[in-house]
Amino acid sequence: MQYPSLNALLIQIATWFISLAFLAFFSIEIELIELVFCQGVFAAIASYFLRMAVWWFFIHLFFAPAIFIALTFNLPPLGYLMAFVLFILIYGSIHRTQVPLYPSSKAVADVITTLFPKNKAFSLIDLGSGGGKLLTSLSTLNLNGNFYGVEAAILPFLASRVRGLFSQSNCSFSWGNFWQYNLSSYDIVYAYLSPAPMNKLWKKALQEMRPGSILISNSFVVPDVPPSESIAINDFNNSVLYIWKI
Ligand SMILES: C[S@@+](CC[C@H](N)C(=O)[O-])C[C@H]1O[C@@H](n2cnc3c(N)ncnc32)[C@H](O)[C@@H]1O
């Protein structure tokens, strides 16, 4: 599904028509709040049958009810605008990337450290480095590494820059789109993204990464490409690191 947010919009519009037609056809009279929940149920069911990712089910189910409830608070319109702007600053163009902000755990940093060479220099790039916590932890634990982070969302990027100021100098952060970065100069590429970009990431890795380098994906597999190794992490998310030797 290439444009899930467009599909979501179409589902929302279509299920409003379906809900109203359903009620008119069966001459059912209900309160506005009931109508709103009825539309949410239709929209959630539609997203299930159209095989949208599982989180869309819950977004559709609660989207109209959430708007209805928010309107009852009579908040000033500026409040919604500010919330929207804050959301964009934190999550960037998540509707396009389909990758939310979610930090790797400390346990992940500890396990990744065991994979690094101990007596020679190496470089690692974190694709979508969020607030920079993972890289600053890694750079403190591994002084023989050079760590680079690329982050598209502005507030996490600024947070990572501030973190970088207080951590080792072998850690640097850039603001941008990691798809525009060539991966050939890194020994290790780390990604904690979502299922959506994994096929594209694998193609990029095959085209650009050097033989002998490794790709680590936290939690998300590349469909039909078995990893060289996988490591289960004992953390809050039960993360699994998937490792491909290129
Ligand atoms: C799940 S978080 C992981 C954060 C960090 N790597 C960690 O492991 O703690 C994914 C991050 O990737 C960022 N991101 C998604 N697509 C991106 C892109 N094309 N370019 C740069 N950053 C991107 C998101 O904004 C988000 O902050």
Image: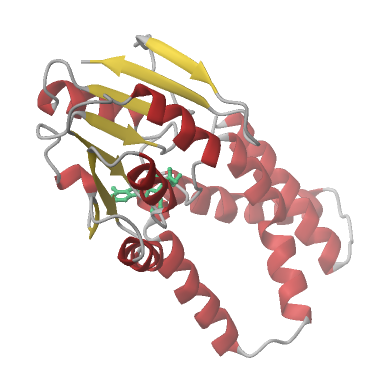
- Quadrant of the image for the C terminus? top left
Query: Along the horizontal axis of the image, is 70 left or right of 189?
Result: right
Instruction: Work out whether residue 105 can be spotted.
Output: no
Quadrant location, the N terminus: top left
Residue 40 placed where, x, y %? 72, 51
Q: Is residue 41 visible?
A: yes
Q: Nearer the viewer, residue 128 or 32?
A: 128
Quadrant assignment, res 141: top left
Residue at 71% from the left image edge and 64% from the top image edge? 66
Residue at horizontal 35 percent and vertical 22 percent from the top: 115
**Whole-percent x, y for residue 180 in the image:** 15, 46
Q: Quadrant of residue 69?
A: bottom right
Instruction: Report whether 22 appears left or right of 94.
Output: right
Q: Which of the 4 quarters of the picture holds residue 80?
A: bottom right
**For the point 35% across and 29% down, which residue is it?**
198
**Is residue 124 found left or right of 54 in the rendered image?**
left
Q: Is residue 82 above or below residue 155?
A: below
Q: Nearer the viewer, residue 97 or 67?
A: 97
Q: Going 47% across and 33% down the picture, which residue do you hit?
A: 110
